[in-house]
Image (spheres, rainbow, N blue to C red):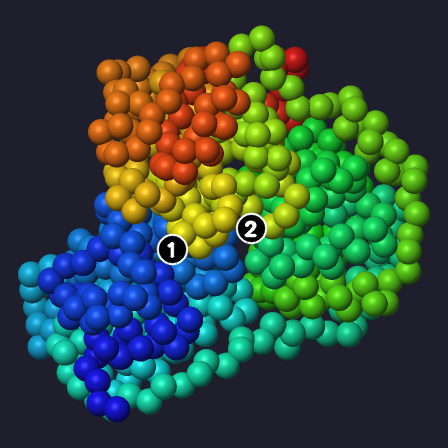
């Protein structure tokens, strides 16, 4: 059949099974929105308050559902407002497709009104991007974008479409997309055998799990692998939920704000098995002293990550789920009781601690865990509250902890919570935020209210930029340059002004009732939890130090 470019965009989205899009219209993309209007019964469009909110919502939708998230924006500033969200998705390997429109082909490169070379801008932060100047190539380009976003190591893809291409006509024929196969082409039998030999000879193995295990849905295979190897487990911020956080063998998070048990365990082990992690600087600390007593085995889908940050002794390249299946089928059961006992003793000796006498961030997070029975989807912003959410909420399953790990994007969580709730409407979705982060994208509260998307925004409000202040306290002689937010902004009134419910919490005993009320209301709710400005995240590793130098309040 003969369709114009805008109609082809919508038909291709339907081909890919897209039923929700997050975006913001404008002149250049008006043709696409006109076509979308005619299919509003098939594709639900969420009009966010800002394009950045749309990109974060598409990201949260993708992380929560495992599908490709889709966002749209117009040319110029509309397109550039997507950039931070695209970069966030790129750093954390999240499959989103961003569709932008541009000025007409004859106007490209002439500094036309609201023109920007968005493919040039986003080239370093996308897995691939396209500008489609010929309508006959539009359908195949959209199909390629979705395939690229999903296959191998996932990531964001951008498609830029000039306005005259959205109006031009061509023949369109529906094509059912092929299933994207798991990446197995790099898996070598000799690499599998080398990995097994390393494991067989290890007396003190330690397993470190990253976001790749979540992305590949390898939880079952990972649990079997852990039991066979009989080793303690730590995770990265992105790896939360890949391994059951309530399991006895779980030691907590590794790295700058990891547990002492995890950091000491990796330092003492003789084999570090790293699964789906790229050895971020926040994990390894001083790279020269990281896991210095151990041989390192790395399992990752991306060959570029092998030997990039840490030199390894062996590696297996391929989809984590597939690699673990093959290893599990060949490896024998091991027993490391003595090693495990030493780890369990460390867990008892070095528990996570906080002041139980006053209202604190860790207490709020623990109350969220109790009230939700550990079954909520938790999104976060970035900072102290993010670390507390990682430390004190026990994640039993993957896709339940959505956070900006690689880019560290303040303002991510609120948009992501909207996307997660749209994608998983049966789940309680709670965004744990700091007051500084809420100020970044607080306008998305109005988006949640407009559609009555019942997300819960829990603000850990210390009236400062908490993590920056913590560094200023510890490393900058308590010189609090531009980190105090103690002004007249009232988040309860702000929530009510935007159409949400606002609740203030100043005492420990008020937290659980506020959460229970928020869940029961089935409306967007902002809970403003007032804590002390000098609460800190511990343990901590100083920048440039080795991870075994982790310290806490007692050490200070």
Question: Residue 498 in the image: x percent, y percent?
Answer: 24, 33
Location of mark 2 (residue) = 399
Image point 28% across, 73% down: which residue?
10
Location of mark 1 (residue) = 58
Question: Residue 286 in the image: x percent, y percent?
Answer: 61, 38
Mark carried by residue 471: none
Q: Nearer the viewer, residue 143 or 89?
A: 143
Q: Nearer the viewer, residue 416 or 383?
A: 416
Relative placement, left or right, of 494 versus 204 is: left
Relative placement, left or right, of 170 versus 427 is: left
Give the SS element for disc 1: helix
Give the SS element for disc 2: loop
Can I make out residue 384 in this image? no
| Disc 2/disc 1 C-alpha distance (Å) | 14 Å
Q: State the quadrant of the N terminus.
A: bottom left
Label 1 crowd (10 A; few <14 / some 14-19 / many >=20) = many
Question: Residue 299 in the image: x percent, y percent?
Answer: 68, 60
Can I make out residue 273 in this image? yes
């Amino acid at each position: 059949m003969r369709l114009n470019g805008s109609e082809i965009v919508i038909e291709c989205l339907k081909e890919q099974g897209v039923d929700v899009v997050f975006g913001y219209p404008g002149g250049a993309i008006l043709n696409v929105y006109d076509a979308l209007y005619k299919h509003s019964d098939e594709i639900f469009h969420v009009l966010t308050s800002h394009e950045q909110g749309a990109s974060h919502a598409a990201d949260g939708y993708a992380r929560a559902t495992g599908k490709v998230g889709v966002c749209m924006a117009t040319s110029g500033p509309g397109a550039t407002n997507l950039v931070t969200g695209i970069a966030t998705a790129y750093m954390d390997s999240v499959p989103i497709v961003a569709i932008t429109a541009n000025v007409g082909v004859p106007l490209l490169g002439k500094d036309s009104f609201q023109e920007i070379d968005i493919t040039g801008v986003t080239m370093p932060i996308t897995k691939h991007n396209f500008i489609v100047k010929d309508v006959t190539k539009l359908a195949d380009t959209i199909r390629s974008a979705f395939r690229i976003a999903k296959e191998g190591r996932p990531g964001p893809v951008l498609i830029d479409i000039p306005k005259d291409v959205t109006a031009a006509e061509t023949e369109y024929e529906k094509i059912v997309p092929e299933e994207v196969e798991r990446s197995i082409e790099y898996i070598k039998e000799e690499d599998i055998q080398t990995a097994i030999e390393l494991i067989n000879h290890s007396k003190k193995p330690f397993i470190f799990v990253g976001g790749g295990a979540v992305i590949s849905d390898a939880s079952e295979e990972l649990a079997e692998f852990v039991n066979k190897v009989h080793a303690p487990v730590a995770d990265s911020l992105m790896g939360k939920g890949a391994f059951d956080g309530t399991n006895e063998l779980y030691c907590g998070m590794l790295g700058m704000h990891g547990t002492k048990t995890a950091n000491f365990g990796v330092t003492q082990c003789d084999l570090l098995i790293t699964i789906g992690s790229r050895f971020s600087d926040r994990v390894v600390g001083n790279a020269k002293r990281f896991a210095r007593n151990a041989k390192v085995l790395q399992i990752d889908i991306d060959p570029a990550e092998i030997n990039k940050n840490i030199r390894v002794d062996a590696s297996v390249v391929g989809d984590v789920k597939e690699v673990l299946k093959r290893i599990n089928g060949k490896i024998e059961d091991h027993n490391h009781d003595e090693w495990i006992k030493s780890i369990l003793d460390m867990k008892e000796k070095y528990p996570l601690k906080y002041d139980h006498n006053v209202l604190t961030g860790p207490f709020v997070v623990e109350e969220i865990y109790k009230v939700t029975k550990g079954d909520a989807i938790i999104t976060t912003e970035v900072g102290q509250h993010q670390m507390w959410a990682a430390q004190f909420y026990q994640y039993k399953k993957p896709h339940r902890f959505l956070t900006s790990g690689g880019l560290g994007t303040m303002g991510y969580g609120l948009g992501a919570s909207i996307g997660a709730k749209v994608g998983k409407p049966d789940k309680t979705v709670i965004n744990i935020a700091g007051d500084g982060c809420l100020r970044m994208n607080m306008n998305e509260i109005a988006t949640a209210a407009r559609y009555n998307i019942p997300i819960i925004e829990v603000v850990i409000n210390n009236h400062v930029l908490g993590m920056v202040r913590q560094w200023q306290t510890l490393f900058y002689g308590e010189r609090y340059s531009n980190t105090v937010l103690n002004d007249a902004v009232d988040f309860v009134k702000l929530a009510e002004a935007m159409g949400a419910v606002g609740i203030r919490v100043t005492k420990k005993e008020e937290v659980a009732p506020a959460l229970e009320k928020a869940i029961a209301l089935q409306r967007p709710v902002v809970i403003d939890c007032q804590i002390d400005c000098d609460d800190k995240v511990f343990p901590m590793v100083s920048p440039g130090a080795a991870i075994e130098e982790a310290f806490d309040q007692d050490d200070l």
